[in-house]
Amino acid sequence: DSGVTQTPKHLITATGQRVTLRCSPRSGDLSVYWYQQSLDQGLQFLIHYYNGEERAKGNILERFSAQQFPDLHSELNLSSLELGDSALYFCASSVVVSDTQYFGPGTRLTVL
Amino acid sequence: GQNIDQPTEMTATEGAIVQINCTYQTSGFNGLFWYQQHAGEAPTFLSYNVLDGLEEKGRFSSFLSRSKGYSYLLLKELQMKDSASYLCAVSRNAGNNRKLIWGLGTSLAVNP
């Protein structure tokens, strides 16, 4: 157990819908990272927050947004969902920027 | 630009030794990580190298040569549970930030 929690574990929804994925970092970690991993694909970095502020953006679509709250938990919002958004979404946390990242168990999103 | 190369697939026999290579090209190099990922699960941290040389951790060892842009992960006394994807990731300085660049992973199959 990495200490990073993610909810929900599974999510099934329809095209055009909007969902919110939640992540709680390890105690003491200030950085939160979001990744997308489609079937048999590599990890795609989406976005990084540090202590409530956005630090870096990767290949994140405009339909996706995220935020980190004062208690350091983070949410990833996915809207106008498409079939191609079906994937595993991982959250990772680290103490500071560029430190070792510890991953949560992931949320498996299925868009039908 | 930045680039990471690792073999897509490897097979090995239980009890044997396997070496998974990773080559990279990047500016602002700040260390190299190895992660293990079982199918459908989260990546788990294995090792971090920032200086040249070999780091040993039980059955797993990781080597880095910064001048050659090269690393390898050595797995000894292979067990069936070592069947997984092994991800190489390079940390690089980017302005006042640091970014992690992920390889696509090497899928290792351990056969009895």
Image (cartoon, rainbow, N blue to C red):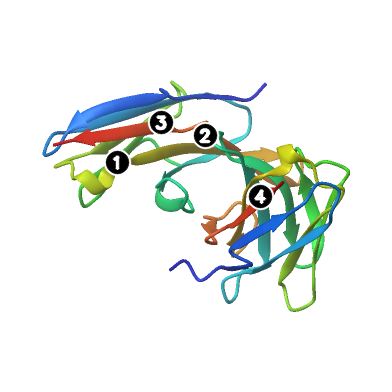
Q: Are marks 2 and 4 on the same chain?
A: yes
Residue A69 placed where, x, y %? Answer: 79, 72
**Comparing marks 4 and 1, which lies closer to the viewer?**
4
**Callout 4: SS:** strand
Q: Give the number of the disc on residue A110.
A: 4
Looking at the rendered structure, the kind of residue marked 2 is Asp
Disc 4 from disc 3: Cα separation: 25 Å
**Callout 3: SS:** strand
Q: Give the number of the disc on residue B106.
A: 3
Subunit under mark 3: B
Q: Residue at x 61, y 39 (%)?
A: A38
Instruction: Report if the CB atoms under discs 1 and 2 are less than 8 Å apart.
Output: no
Q: Residue at x 67, y 43 (%)?
A: A45
Q: What residue did someone put label 1 on?
A: B83
Circle 3 packing at 10 Å, graded few (<14), some (14-19), many (20+), is many
Looking at the rendered structure, the kind of residue marked 3 is Thr
Residue A57 placed where, x, y %? Answer: 78, 44
Disc 2 from disc 3: Cα separation: 11 Å
Instruction: Report if the CB atoms under discs 4 and 1 are less than 8 Å apart.
Output: no
Among the two numbered marks 2 and 4 on one chain, the one whose residue lies closer to the N terminus: 2
Q: What residue did someone put label 2 on?
A: A40
Circle 2 packing at 10 Å, graded few (<14), some (14-19), many (20+), is few
Looking at the rendered structure, the kind of residue marked 4 is Thr
Q: Residue at x 35, y 41 (%)?
A: B84
